[in-house]
Amino acid sequence: MPARYVSGYLSHGAGHEAHASSHAWAEAFVDYLGWVGFDPTNRACATDAYIRTAVGLDYAEAGPVRGVRSGGGTETMKIRVSFPSQQQQQAQ
């Protein structure tokens, strides 16, 4: 059965209180259904709250951030994930 590692974000809440946290899950290709997401951390199947950003065979291929940093100093990283609300999707 074909399977893959997925990295992305998991949306929590709705409206102005919504936030997304980085997350990872697995997907398997199921006949007549296509790719189905399985989240062992939350013991659930992936829903519309799961925002896929990369897929691969493992974390090395689908990690959310990749690179090399050299030199001194300090750094910060800020991430903002925007996605349409359910009301916006239904209006389309």
Image: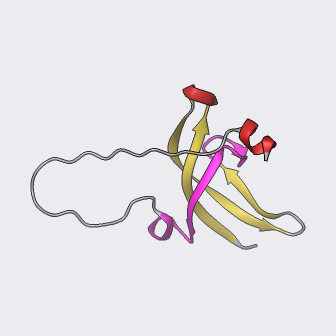
Q: Is residue 55 found inside the magenta-colored segment of the image?
A: yes
Picture layout, residue 26 above or below residue 1: above
Give the residue at the far left of this rendering: 72
Relative image position of residue 12 (x, y in whole percent):
60, 34
Q: Nearer the viewer, residue 10 or 83?
A: 83
- Residue at image x 63%, y 67%? 4
51 with respect to 71 (left or right):
right
Relative image position of residue 15 (x, y in whole percent):
62, 29
Picture layout, residue 27 above or below residue 81: below
- Residue at image x 50%, y 66%? 62
60 with respect to 38 (left or right):
left
Q: Nearer the viewer, residue 19 or 56?
A: 19
Range of residues picked out in magenta = 40-62
35 with respect to 71 (left or right):
right
71 with respect to 9 (left or right):
left
- Residue at image x 9%, y 55%? 72
